[in-house]
């Protein structure tokens, strides 16, 4: 089991390196983030013991359950799931350093309120729904610029870039289109040069499409199954929560 994880990490790092070489990029520009939903603390530990430093959960409940077991190991924790405003307190309590899934004003307001009270700041990425699928979270690409301008006025929220899930498809060119939407938005925002907004990070690409994402400029690829193996829950359980009904399960 442990050997599997280490073997998979080697393969993923090779894939990242090859994709970087093919697109003339430095592999040092692309961070590997481990998406650890449903993965036990024990297995996450194995990865952290082998040079991995960046992990992310989708649900506050899982963050909470694994926190004690992992807190003494050096690592950084991002949040990549749909975040309910009533869970903002927990995000801060469990040392999340970046919320990659900021996609609406009430969440930005709530984060700012709580952070102000605790005299803290947090990094955020703006999640964009580049595939225009009803079922996916994220702000519509056309509304993103205005949203970013508004969020930039909250001094506690440090905007670092953009995140997207993109289309789930075997057709590479359709997936690529989503990543291009994110990249174009990033370029547009860089030109606008909004005070206090950094647009350095593009979080896109997962187990199945990380090569395409790297070719289109990803600086963070989020990988779960290709390192830890298949999950029993369908991804819709994590992505559509509150949108589509999970009773379908
Ligand atoms: C689960 C998840 C990933 C990783 O997906 P895999 O296909 O398992 O690599 C990436 N991003 C988000 C937001 C996720 O929920």
Image: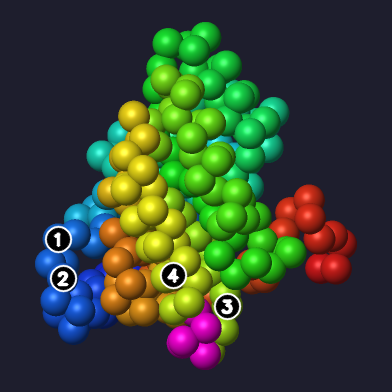
Provide the residue designation for mark 3.
168
Residue at 72% from the left image edge and 59% from the top image edge: 240
Q: Earlier in the sequence, mark 3 or mark 4?
A: 3
**Which span is picked out in magenta?**
171-175
Q: Main secondary structure of the magenta part?
A: helix
Give SS at disc 2: loop
Q: Residue at x 63, y 40 (%)?
A: 104
Q: Sequence-wise, which precedes: disc 1 or disc 3?
A: 1
Verify whether residue 13 appears in magenta.
Answer: no
The image shows residue 197, relative to residue 237, as above or below, that is above
Residue in front for this viewpoint, 84 or 75: 84
Quarter of the image with the C terminus is: bottom right
Distance of mark 4 from mark 1, alpha carbons?
20 Å
Q: Secondary structure at mark 3?
A: loop
Q: Earlier in the sequence, mark 4 or mark 1?
A: 1
- Label for residue 25? 2
Q: Distance of mark 3 from mark 2, alpha carbons?
A: 25 Å
Mark yes or no: residue 101 visible: no
Q: Residues within 10 Å of mark 4 (few under 14, many from 20)?
A: many
Residue highlighted by disc 1 = 28
Q: Is residue 69 above or below residue 152?
A: below
* Mark 4 residue element: helix
**Quick check: 239 left or right of 113?**
right
User: Which image quadrant for residue 37?
Assistant: bottom right
Q: Are marks 3 and 2 in contact (CB under 8 Å)?
A: no
Residue 175 vertical placement versus 44 (above, below): below
Residue 198, how many percent across, how many down? Answer: 31, 40
- Could you tell me which residue is drawn at 40 percent across and 62 percent down? 184
Question: Looking at the image, is mark 1 or mark 2 nearer the viewer?
Answer: 2
Q: Which badge, 3 or 2, is on the more N-terminal residue?
A: 2
Which one is nearer the viewer's eye here, 153 or 79? 153
């Amino acid at each position: 089991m442990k050997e599997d994880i280490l073997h998979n990490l080697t393969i993923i790092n090779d894939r990242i390196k090859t994709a970087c070489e093919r697109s003339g990029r430095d592999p040092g520009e692309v961070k590997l983030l481990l998406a650890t939903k449903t993965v036990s603390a024990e297995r996450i530990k194995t990865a952290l013991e082998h040079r991995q430093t960046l992990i992310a959960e989708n649900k506050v409940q899982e963050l909470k359950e694994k926190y004690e077991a992992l807190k003494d190991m050096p690592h950084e924790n991002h949040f990549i799931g749909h975040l309910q405003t009533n869970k903002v307190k927990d995000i801060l309590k469990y040392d999340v350093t970046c919320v990659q899934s900021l996609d609406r004003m009430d969440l930005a307001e709530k984060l700012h309120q709580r952070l102000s009270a605790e005299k803290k700041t947090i990094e955020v990425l703006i999640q964009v729904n580049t595939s225009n699928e009803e079922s996916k979270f994220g702000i519509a690409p056309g509304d993103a610029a205005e949203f970013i301008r508004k969020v930039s006025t909250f001094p506690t929220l440090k905007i670092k870039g953009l995140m997207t899930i993109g289309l789930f498809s075997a057709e590479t060119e359709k997936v690529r289109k989503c990543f291009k939407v994110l990249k174009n938005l990033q370029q547009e925002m860089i030109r606008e040069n909004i005070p206090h907004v950094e647009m350095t990070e593009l979080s896109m690409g997962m187990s199945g499409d990380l090569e395409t994402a790297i070719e289109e400029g990803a600086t963070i690829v989020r990988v779960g199954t290709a390192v830890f193996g298949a999950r029993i829950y369908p991804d819709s359980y994590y992505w559509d929560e509150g949108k589509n009904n999970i009773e379908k399960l």
